[in-house]
Image (tube, helix red, strand yellow):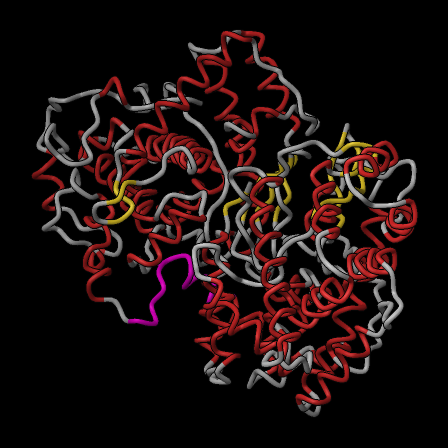
Amino acid sequence: MAFMLNSMFFCYLCDLITNDINTNKMNTDMKRMKNWVLAATLTFCGAIMLTSCTDAIGTADNPVNPNPPYDPAGELASETFLHEEWMDRSVKPGDSFWDFALGSWVKNHDSMDNGTLLNAYLNRLDVLMTGLLESASDHHTLQLLMGPKLTKEEEKAAMGRVYAQLKQGDDISKADVIYNIGKMADMGFYAFMGHDVLNIDGAIRYYIMPGLACSSIKLTDSKEEHLQEFKLIFEEWLDIDTSTPEGAQLLSNVYDIEAWILKYSQEWKKSEPEPALIGNRRPGLKSDPVLAMEALASARRTTRAGDDVMDAFREAFHIENGTYYLPETDKIFELIDQYDIATLQTYLKFYLYYKLYQVSLSMAVEPVNVIVSLNMYAPSMFLKYQKKYLMQDADCEGASQVLEQLRNVMSERIASLDWLSDATKMKAQEKLQAMVFNIGAPDDLFNADFKLTGQTHFEDFVQYKEQADDYMRNQLAGKPGNQYGWEYIMVSPMGASIDAANAFYEANSNQLFILPAFLGKELFPADKPAVRYATITVFGHEMTHGFDNKGATYDAMGNKADWWTAEDKAKFLEKQEQMINRYNELEQYPGVMADGKKTLGENIADLGGFSMAYQMWNEKLQADGLTGEALRHQQRQFFVSYADYWQCNEDEKLMKNMLETDVHSANHNRANGIARLMDDWYTLFSVEPGDKLYVKPADRVKIW
């Protein structure tokens, strides 16, 4: 999982871009372009849990002390905090800690102020985009983008040259359609079916999976709302007249296929979908892939696919003895059986043109907008330049030290748990010690030898995706799963780009990734300890993803394994239910409660990340010699800085969409939900029974 931009924000970004392209009103202002990317760049994904431990100052993490020998309310009233101007002192901390810390900002901030995380990313995007444009003479695609601007007709012709690589004509068969699906998958376009790599039994394996939707449709919207968007592609780019009965039927069928694939993805992906980065993000899987050769016989029996279709499938998807197959792909053959060849071919063309349309220069005003889109759909296409400009102030050494310190802290916490047996503790410790940390960017560039020679940026785009796919299948597959972290997460069309404001944990390789956005002066400053330690909650959040409700089902090598005793597992499930209940008590928006089950993993992660970073903060304060009121003020500052991290523009539409689609809690609940589980918060901020966020001591969940 990951500390990144969630899927809802990604869809929001796509909506913004698509709406502006469709109306040809793209704003040339760099700041707005950055806001698009930003909307798709920052949400946190990952999960980690808490335990009760003794910290360096000799007290429990969460000491219960309802009658402290000092006046916390008086101290709080007299103190000044970092970003005091953001705070709303009229709000009781125990009613909404997020509003207490950020209420004035929420009410009064400038419309272009996107909040702590988004603003930090915008600053880095400025540096990156300036650098990329300066590097144009050294990159073929950038040269094309900075050269004479293509007309719409020239772009259509370039798209046509890409489409010409597929089999066409009046006499093509279903087997030819399967060939085309495979060819598009090789280009990185996963229409109907696609392929990726996954760590299976300690090695990276190439496997085949169902396809992914290409558009940004929402199943909660009506078909008619999205047909207008599809109609634009049909008429302006595919030259299909939708006013005719035949054209109208093709339009309707293509939408139905797209909606079916989108809905079906909810069945074969994990019930909690992986959040999106800049890029689609490889999906988590509900089922384990099986050997493809064995699966093909089953596919023949359960669908009407004949030998010619299955033979074409074997060839098109490069199926060999070591190839794997996700069983849910069988359903795709059934979908293909339902439609005639003309509809299937039209969907493939629509899919290809829709994806290329997203990187159309004729629809944008500035090349920089296209660079953003290219990077969204071809992660790491500009890796060399991203690394050069994003790593300038990255404190990788400091992050490495912090992660090792976190590893030690978590090891101590695991050892002290009173609800885990020694047998399960030993397995947890093995996994923690085996966890690999990847910080900043790869040392070696996997794509250094890729050649781009297209006439247009479209052809460069496809060439890059084809070479990345070939690298994934023929060089990465078969390598040890826990030794090729950067390649594993960056090479896939659904992979990550290092320019994302992101950190994440990969359960099936037991590796943790911290990208440059969390290593620079904005979020990891050496001269602002409270801000730096707030970012350490992110690092801890990701570390415990290895031990959340999903990560705990994988072992030290990233293999699916049950390393829990039955008794320990039962206790763990009970604690998960407690977490679900606590977050079900919070409002998503007025009158509607949050979904603690959907957001369980992320909430556990937030709790663990906060707890470990807070323990480290207290150890630092002790080492600095702080005592009494000075100590308590810095403890309060940590809580306030953590809430500041979740500064963002929230509105009811956004909250509704998050409730439907996102595995993360709303930002206000990420601040409130963690604070109310920490005993120190109650004494430091004078929170009492009757306050809206008050939780009885016995109900304050502690896990790792």
Q: Is residue 583 magenta?
A: no
Residue drawn at point x = 50 percent, y = 11 percent: 568
Residue 325 image offset from top left, x and y in percent: 78, 38
Q: Is residue 133 visible?
A: no
Quadrant, the C terminus = top left
Residue nearest the observer in this picture, 78 or 473: 473
Q: In the figure, 323 relative to 257: above or below?
A: above
Estimate the x, y position of residue 141 in percent, counting from the top left: 74, 77
Q: State the residue in front, 314 or 369.
A: 314
Within the magenta stretch, is there residue 117? yes
Q: Quadrant of the N terminus?
A: top right
Snapshot quadrant of residue 423: top right
Which is the main secondary structure of the residues drawn in magenta?
helix
- Residue at 49% across / 63% down in the picture? 223
Indicate the quadrant where residue 248 lies: bottom right
Please state which of residues 305 and 317 is positioned toward the viewer in this rendering: 305
Residue 3: x and y, percent?
50, 46
Camera-nearest residue between 99 and 6 = 6
Query: Which residue reaches farthest front?
Result: 245
Total of numbered circles in the picture?
Answer: 0
| Residue 248 appears left or right of 115 | right
Q: Position of residue 481 (x, y in %)?
A: 76, 36
Evaluate whether residue 229 shows in this view: yes
Q: Give the quarter of the image for residue 579.
A: top left
For residue 177, above or below residue 606: below
Q: Is residue 572 left or right of residue 471?
A: left
Using the image, determine if residue 249 lies above or below residue 138: above
Q: Is residue 168 left or right of residue 51?
A: right
Residues shaded magenta: 111-124
Vertical arrangement, residue 152 with respect to residue 12, above or below:
below
